[in-house]
Amino acid sequence: MEQMNLMAAWIGIQLGIISGIVMSLMFHREAWLGGYSIWARRLVRLAHVSYFGIAFINMSYALTVQQFHLGEHGPWPGLLLIIGAITMPVACYLAAWRKSLRHLFGLPVFSLLSGMLAFALEVVMP
């Protein structure tokens, strides 16, 4: 499973770079997405940052499992972290499009928190 987390991390980094390139083509326009402090623009920036942030979480997870030979644990922590990596930017973009979709943030937050707690419990109580 940790190989999938490592791959998800590198894909997240690539998507973060691509989304940054796309935003850099338009960020100089003050009115882009309604202006710098407008909800939609903040959420698009959050999606961009979430690609990198969650990629580093997935990378840290994969390297920790490999370094400390923790391969005996179940697949849930890694799978939940990958789900969080996918759903967080999706939730950001959807909430930027329709503010009422902000309630979707529960899925990536629950997924990431559950993945980290499951990993911590498996390390502490094998």
Image (tube, rainbow, N blue to C red):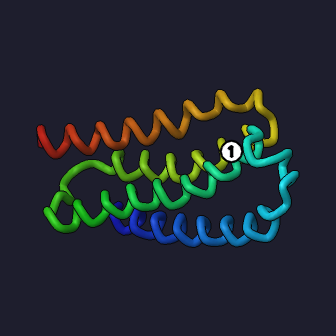
Q: Nearer the viewer, residue 80 or 16?
A: 16
Choose between 86 and 14: the one closer to the eye.
14
Q: Quadrant of residue 106?
A: top right
Q: Residues within 10 Å of mark 1 (few under 14, many from 20)?
A: many
| Picture coordinates of residue 108, whole percent (x, y) | 53, 40
Residue 17 lies, with reference to residue 58, above or below; the image says: below
- Quadrant in the picture for residue 56: bottom left
Image coordinates of residue 84 in percent, x first then y, are 50, 46
Residue visible at 70% across and 50% down in the picture: 44
Nearest the camera: 20 or 107? 20
Which residue is found at the position 79% from the left and 70% from the top?
A: 25
Element type at marker 1? Answer: helix
Q: State the residue at coordinates (29%, 39%).
A: 118
Give the residue number, with chain letter if any, for mark 1: 43
Q: Amino acid at mark 1?
A: Leu
Q: Is residue 49 left or right of residue 27?
A: left
The residue that appears at 34% across and 47% down in the rendered structure is 77
Side of 22 where 118 appears, left or right: left
Residue 97: % across, % down: 81, 41
Residue 1 percent across, percent down from the top left? 35, 61
Does residue 41 appear left or right of residue 86 in this picture? Answer: right
Q: Is residue 100 above or below residue 47?
A: above
The count of marks equals 1
* The C terminus, quarter of image: top left
